[in-house]
Amino acid sequence: MGKADIAVKNWLSDNGRFADLFNGMIFGGRQVIRPEELDTMDRETDIIITDKNGKSRGMQRHRDIAKRWKRQVALAVLACEAQNDINYAMPVRNMTQDGLSYTDQIRIQWKEKEKAKKSGRKGNKLTGEEYLSRFGKEDKIFPVITLVFYYDVKKWDAALELYDMFELDIEQKDAELLKKYIPNYRINLIDAGNVKHLERFRTDLQQVFGMLQCRSEKEKLQEYIRKNKDYFESVDVETYQAMRELLRSERIMRDMSSAGKEEKIDMCRAMEEWYADAVREGRAAGMKQGIAEGLAEGRTEGRAEGIAEGRAEGIAEGRAKGRAEGRKVIIRTMLTKGLSPEEIASYTDATDEEIDQVRKEMEK
């Protein structure tokens, strides 16, 4: 896991933000899940599965973020998978992880029953069927809800449900009939740059989702940050680090991971510096390309017609070098054809020194 990936996951792991994400996406903004009702769970668990022949094998489950939602008793397991790239097998991946979460719950309950049996506690007698199932008739498990938090600029073009991954080379009516007997699995995708109804979010998810909708246009992004300067003028280090990844600007915006947790960062200023750096890089690139194009045009035509608009810094140097290089090509051609220095000078306006220099280069 890269440093930048960790920044986004740490940011989303905050209980207030995590609850807001589920409330906004699932409950339409109603405050159903409260931060104080969330407990962080282990993100990685090794599960030992034993088959009917007594053979065991291990299965590992890794979650980006997993929390237990509880009030008086546990109600659900909430998970979030942060994706900075498209995963074309996401329905199967999530289905496997959710299935292992359910398996883990059954395993834990069974271990508790075995402990109770060894301690001699009453009321823990199991029927044969329950023993074979390793799950009691009255036992219950908690639902698992997984959100996929996708934050790359590229549009998600992978499957959204298990059915989208099937290739059924049969008639449509038969395919529809078959689906009645094939359980589907749908992923809960959050495209962070295209979230609707921002008003449903109560934390800074609202400002950040709004920012991501402008990330492809720097001027629009700057304007959005200025309009929301009350928030962006003072963001915490964790949020700033996540923004660097969400905006894909890790190479431009400074790494502030070493700053103190209490330190506040002015994103308005950071964005101005980012924009200024981008302009400088653009000018440098334009100059370099302008010189190269000027030289190329000069070599072929003996003159420079100018370079694309916006590369002003490269035009002057490109023309000068282009003319000089182009004149050398013409002088060399004329000397090869036997023209005298006087004739060459009359055609090209070249000086005696230039003609003599080309002649010496040809002799070498």
Image (cartoon, helix red, strand yellow):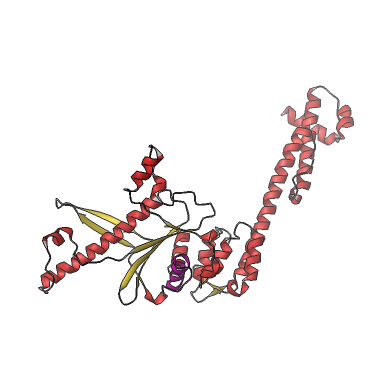
- Tell me which segment is drawn in magenta: 14-29
The answer to whether residue 348 is left or right of residue 300 is: right
Residue 4 percent location from the top left of the image: 48, 60
Report how many numbered discs are placed on residues in the image.
Answer: 0
Q: Quadrant of the N terminus?
A: bottom left
- Residue toward you, 305 or 357: 305
Q: Is residue 167 visible?
A: no
Residue 197 sits above or below residue 281 on the image: below
Magenta stretch: dominant SS?
helix
Quick one: which residue is furthest to the top in this view?
338
Which residue lies at the image location 32% right of the left edge and 64% below the top edge? Answer: 143
Residue 2 sits above or below residue 165 on the image: below
The answer to whether residue 185 is left or right of residue 328 is: left
- Residue toward you, 284 or 142: 142
Residue 83 percent location from the top left of the image: 45, 56
Which residue lies at the image location 40% right of the left edge and 49% below the top edge? Answer: 89
Residue 53 sits above or below residue 192 on the image: above
Residue 111 percent location from the top left of the image: 19, 66
Residue 275 percent location from the top left of the image: 65, 61
102 in magenta: no
Q: Is residue 347 visible?
A: yes
